[in-house]
Amino acid sequence: QVQLVESGGGLVQPGGSLRLSCAASGFRISVYTMGWYRQVPGKQREWVARMASGGSPNYSDSVKGRFTISRDNAQNTVYLQMNSLKPEDTAVYYCNADFRLLGAQHNYWGQGTQVTVSS
């Protein structure tokens, strides 16, 4: 059974840090582009960061310089290190796995983990 399970969310003060994890099962992430997205109630899901297999990380302008995405293919896990957190980073954060090749596509989402930045 294919699954992505996020963890590491919680309540943190502005300026603080959190590290999110996304553990995959039922498939190997090594050939997938792995990404993080976030969503607040009433708004569309927003892309945060992604890292292709063997590629360099990419970040949205809103998190560049503060967030770092990394992947451990051996552990089948992706991470999002979030530093200098701001109240506007408050959202549910989702992990995504995407694979596309020769017309075939596989796309999976986790259930999300809540991040709240507040004093």
Image (cartoon, rainbow, N blue to C red):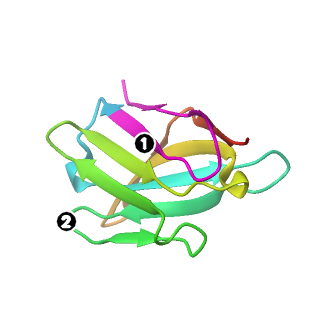
Q: Quadrant of residue 31?
A: bottom left
Separation of residues labelled 2 and 1 (CA atoms): 22 Å
Left or right: 14, with 7 as reference point: right
Which region shows up in magenta? 1-23
Of the numbered discs in the image, which one, if any, rests on residue 76? none
Q: Residue furthest bottom?
A: 61
| Quadrant holding the C terminus | top right
Q: Amino acid at mark 2?
A: Gly
Q: Residue furthest right?
A: 42
According to the image, label 1 marks what residue? 19
Q: Quadrant of residue 53?
A: bottom left
State yes or no: discs 2 and 1 in contact (Cβ < 8 Å). no
Q: Nearer the viewer, residue 40 or 103?
A: 40
Q: Nearer the viewer, residue 37 or 83?
A: 83
Q: What's the residue at 19%, 65% (across, down)?
A: 54
Q: Position of residue 70 (x, y in %)?
A: 30, 54
Q: Main secondary structure of the magenta part?
A: strand
Q: Amino acid at mark 1?
A: Arg
Front disc: 2 or 1? 1
Left or right: 116, with 35 as reference point: right
Per the image, is 81 magenta? no
Left or right: 33, with 116 as reference point: left
Circle 2: element type: loop
Disc tally is 2
Q: Position of residue 74 (x, y in %)?
A: 14, 40
Q: What's the residue at 44%, 40% (across, down)?
A: 20
Other-residue count near label 1 (Cα within 10 Å), few / some / many at <14 / 14–19 / ≥20: some
Q: Position of residue 71 (x, y in %)?
A: 27, 50
| First-in-chain label (2 vs 1) | 1
According to the image, label 2 marks what residue? 54
Residue 13, placed above or below residue 54:
above
